[in-house]
Amino acid sequence: MAAASPPDAPAAPPAPPAPVDRLPPGWAARRLLTQPHRLGFAAAALVWAAGALAWALALLHPVPAVVGVPAVTLHALAFVLGPMPLFFAGFLFTSAPKWLRAPALPTIHLLPGVLACVLGWLLALGTGPWRADAAALGLALCAAGWALIVRLLVRLRRGATRRSRHFDAIAGVTAALVPVLAAASLALATGDADLARRLARAALWGVVLPVFLLASHRLLPFLSHADAPQPDAPEPAGDALWVPALPLAASLAMAALSLAPATLAAQPALLLLRGGLHAAAALLTGWLVWRWARHPSMRTPLLRRLLRAFAWSGLGWLALAAAVLPGVPAAWRAGLDAAALHLLAMGFAGTTLLAMVSRLSLTLAGRPLAQDRAAAWLDGLLQAALLARLLAALWPAAAALALPLAASGWALLALAWLWQHGGLAGRPRTPPRGGA
């Protein structure tokens, strides 16, 4: 994407012929089992919509005298551990066989794990406000389902004929979701909602964001080639491994601090280390965005969206660095921490996810990307929801209005994506025009 390949680059092998679709025309549930991305993306979209609706309803119509799991804890768990891993599964089992030159696994093998995750989340979200034990059972079911998926990742790796450092790192990181889900289930079962919420934050910093950084380094030019080569220049040999190293270190540090005792996390030495690490990550991100914003490849709408997502992460690291400056009032520090959390979760991870999985879904469905008018609207809705959430974090007086608006926008986005791409997952592939 960033630079032209050298003239003597070997030609890519021809793509294998698409399997013949013998299912009836129109939407068919059995078609979800024909390709991993269909099953994974449809399941993720369903869990995303359920979690987003539950959060919006909790803000618009609070449940009186909640005796189960607090809404904010359920929201944190569902946002981080709900749709994201299922999107990861759909993407990995579709793309990783090419990375590894390994035989693809039949999609039916994914069904038990994916189904366990979906049923677990529907149980947790549907009963959580009233029954913490039922929500704990739902998360335990999710942990079992993800363990089955990790087992399949190991099986895929064993069939590889080529090594992929990115796959190995991503698979290793996502395997940590099994103990995280199990620990969150135990926390809810014992009535420790605060621990469950901290586990969700630790999973965001220690699993979700590292996966996005690693995948972006594998796929996106501004995280693999820091020097922004021109289109007519040879592509630099090797990847710039140092580029994602600093944001990865900053994210993993936050994961450790999320689970550390409050007295330890507030130690001046740790605050100074955290502030310096996050300030350095912000400077690096800003420098990369500045260099790549003027590159000719950024004229592509998809790459512009992905670069903007990366820019949101830089603002998130900057907010985290500002939150630990000496003399910052406690209320401001809480607002900056909340803003940083959503800049990285919604701004970076959310925008990147929306752009990449939408592109993959459309491409494999045979739909021309240039005709996807909904992409700009969905992206605009996500940015509006993010801005409303930042307003609620940084201006508490506006939170009563801005927070429900952000939750409603997030729910509308989830429903729209489920309608469009969940529909594509169950429909036959559009045949190419002109026999291309």
Image (cartoon, rainbow, N blue to C red):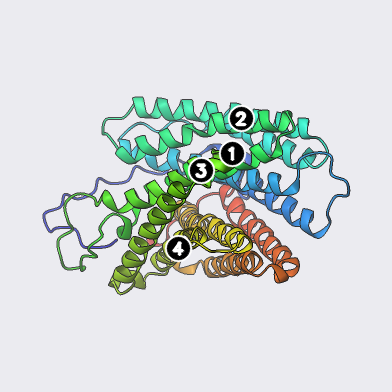
Q: How far is mark 4 from mark 2, CA to CA?
A: 31 Å
Mark 3 or mark 1: name the one nearer the start of the chain: 1
| Residue at the image position 50 percent from the left and 51 percent from the top | 429
Q: Assess whether mark 2 and mark 3 are in contact (beta carbons under 8 angstroms).
A: no
Distance Cα–Cα, label 1 vs label 4 = 23 Å
- Which secondary structure lies at badge 3? helix
Q: At label 1, which amino acid type do we have?
A: Leu
101 lies left or right of 308: left
Q: With respect to residue 434, does 272 lie above or below?
A: above
Tell me where residue 70 appears, x and y as whole percent.
76, 45
Report if the CB atoms under discs 3 and 4 are less than 8 Å apart.
no
Which element is circle 2 on?
A: helix
From the image, tell me which residue sits under label 2: 183
Where residue 211 appears, x then y in whole percent?
A: 43, 45
The residue wearing badge 1 is 199
Q: Which residue is mark 3?
A: 257
Percent position of residue 105, x then y: 44, 30
Mark 1 or mark 4, which is nearer to you? 4
- Return the mark for residue 361: none
Q: Amino acid at mark 2?
A: Ala
Q: Depth check: give the residue in front, 316 or 103.
A: 316
Callout 3 amino acid: Leu
Q: Confirm whether residue 81 shows in the render.
A: no
Q: Residue at x 53, y 47 (%)?
A: 266
Q: Nearer the viewer, mark 3 or mark 2?
A: 3
Residue at which label 4 appears? 318
Q: Nearer the viewer, residue 407 or 112?
A: 407
